[in-house]
Image: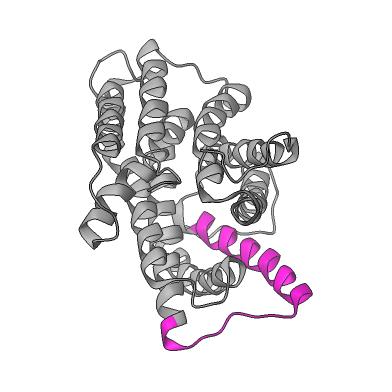
Amino acid sequence: MIARAKQGNGFLFLMLLGCGLIWGASFPLNKIAVSAGYRDFGIIFWNQLIAASVLAVICWQRGVWPGFQRKQIRLYLAVMLCGTLLPNWASYTASVYLPAGVVALLISLVPMFAFPIALAFGAERFAWRRFAGLLTGMAAVLLIAGPEASLPERAMVVFIPLALIAPFLYGLEGNLVAKWGDTGEGPVRVLLGASLLGVITSLPIALISGTFIDPRGPWGAPDLAIVIGAITNVIAYTGYVWLVGRAGAVFSAQVAYIVTAAGLLWSMILLSESYSSYIWFALVLMMAGLFLVQPREAE
């Protein structure tokens, strides 16, 4: 699993840990943002604008910019819709009603959704070990949704399917990018192109839906959470892409374990959330499912 990571190279492990810890913080930050009444497309617009600004600086320093030919626009649209607008809408809406730690736990289903989608696309061959990982992840979801004592309020269970939309779309996005490639641009330019389209798309929706957030203030913790969340997501993803290039995709995929655990940990620290024994057992099942479903170097 860590074949491409040189033994004794602690820096790669620190990068893996750092990316996971930063990504995990996004879940309580989302919860803080929606706690003030901020909603989906208002938050999405500012996230996209901040992300586009940071990525534009990176592209400016490199002297390269995203192209806008037909195949590139198709890729940007897929990343925007499946990687940002729709999954963020689902996550922000679910975060209004569900504990941030539970949302973090459910988002770790991405590779478990990605596997059957890849089978449908003909991009993967069936493997019993990975199928077992898929079943284990499903068992974890049932453990969260089933017992009456699993969630703080029983009524929250109706919002679990909403939270599952995000990992499904992320799994679809990954398969589309794998199928189409990055058109030779690399992830930073692809993300910038998608973020620019996201800004153009989310602004009118935010204005029409009445969810636009006035940036003039007064500012509070929810406003800072939006800004910090957008910046940390860009930093974490850029670090992850760097890690894939240096240590390989299989080693880097282990960030999913850290993101899941960190999401629960940050939610406990920042939001004082507590979880039932069912949630902790679901975490164990989810970790086992992630281990089984992730591809190995030989596959």
Q: Quadrant of residue 294?
A: top left
In the rendered structure, the answer to whether residue 12 lies left or right of residue 203 reads right
Going by the picture, which residue comes out furthest to the front? 298
In the rendered structure, the answer to whether residue 203 lies left or right of residue 53 reads left
Q: Is residue 210 visible?
A: no
Of the pair 147 and 128, the residue shown nearer to us: 128
Estimate the x, y position of residue 206 in percent, counting from the top left: 46, 64
In this picture, is 38 found above or below 135?
Answer: below
Going by the picture, which residue comes out furthest to the bottom? 69
Image point 75% across, 80% down: which residue?
63
Of the pair 33 and 165, the residue shown nearer to us: 165
Estimate the x, y position of residue 21 in percent, counting from the top left: 63, 35
Estimate the x, y position of residue 124 in percent, counting from the top left: 29, 55
Q: Quadrant of residue 158?
A: top left
Of the pair 187 and 268, the residue shown nearer to us: 187
Image point 42% across, 35% down: which residue?
103
In magenta stretch: residue 69? yes
Estimate the x, y position of residue 84 in percent, counting from the top left: 46, 59
Of the pair 167 and 135, the residue shown nearer to us: 135
Q: Is residue 121 visible?
A: yes
From which residue to which does the magenta span run? 42-71
In magenta stretch: residue 56? yes
Image point 39% across, 69% down: which residue?
78
